[in-house]
Structures are given as C-alpha cells and as structure tokens.
Amino acid sequence: MFGAAAGRGAAAAVPAARQQLSEAALAAMARGVPAATARGYRGDWTRFEQWALAAGLRPLPATPRP
C-alpha cells in the first residue's frame, strides 16, 4: 500500500508542472475553465485519489494493472 504520502506527492506533480508555464499560459488556462467545471474536476480528482490509495494504487503515475 502506498498511503497518504503517495497521494500528496502525486497531487504535487501538477502544481510543480505549472511552475514551468509562462504567466500568459497560466492566465489562459484560468480563463478557459469555468469555476463550476474547475470545482467538478477537483471533486473528481479527490474521489479518484482516495479510491486509488484505498486500493493500494498510486494515483500518478498510475499503477499499471498486471
């Protein structure tokens, strides 16, 4: 099992990747996703991450199934 620490590491991968984007790219991303959609994505990700960790899998990178 990977535990909660693995989830925090996986969730940190996206913000770390965003640090490599220009301010213009970040602004375009923020304008391109309606607030309700962003909330939905966050909720979906949270539920997926919780499911994966409970199943002993890594959310990111995804653990391959044998």
Image (cartoon, helix red, strand yellow):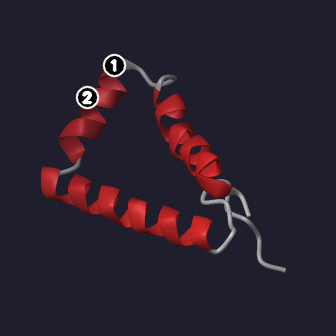
Q: Quadrant of residue 52?
A: bottom right
Looking at the rendered structure, the kind of residue marked 2 is Ala
Looking at the rendered structure, the kind of residue marked 1 is Glu
Left or right, 34 with respect to 2, comes to: left
Q: Position of residue 31 (x, y in %)?
A: 19, 39
Left or right, 65 with respect to 13, comes to: right
Q: Position of residue 19 (x, y in %)?
A: 48, 23
Q: Residue at x 64, y 75 (%)?
A: 55
| Tag 1–tag 2 contact (CB < 8 Å) | yes
Left or right, 15 with respect to 34, comes to: right
Q: Quadrant of residue 58?
A: bottom right
Q: Residue at x 73, y 65 (%)?
A: 63
Disc 1 residue crowd, few under 14, some 14–19, many 20+, Cα 10 Å? few
Q: Residue at x 53, y 32 (%)?
A: 17
Looking at the image, residue 5 lies above or below residue 49: above
Q: Quadrant of residue 44?
A: bottom left
Residue under pointer 2: 27
Q: Residue at x 49, y 65 (%)?
A: 50
Residue under pointer 1: 23
Q: Secondary structure at mark 1?
A: helix
Q: Position of residue 38 (x, y in %)?
A: 24, 53
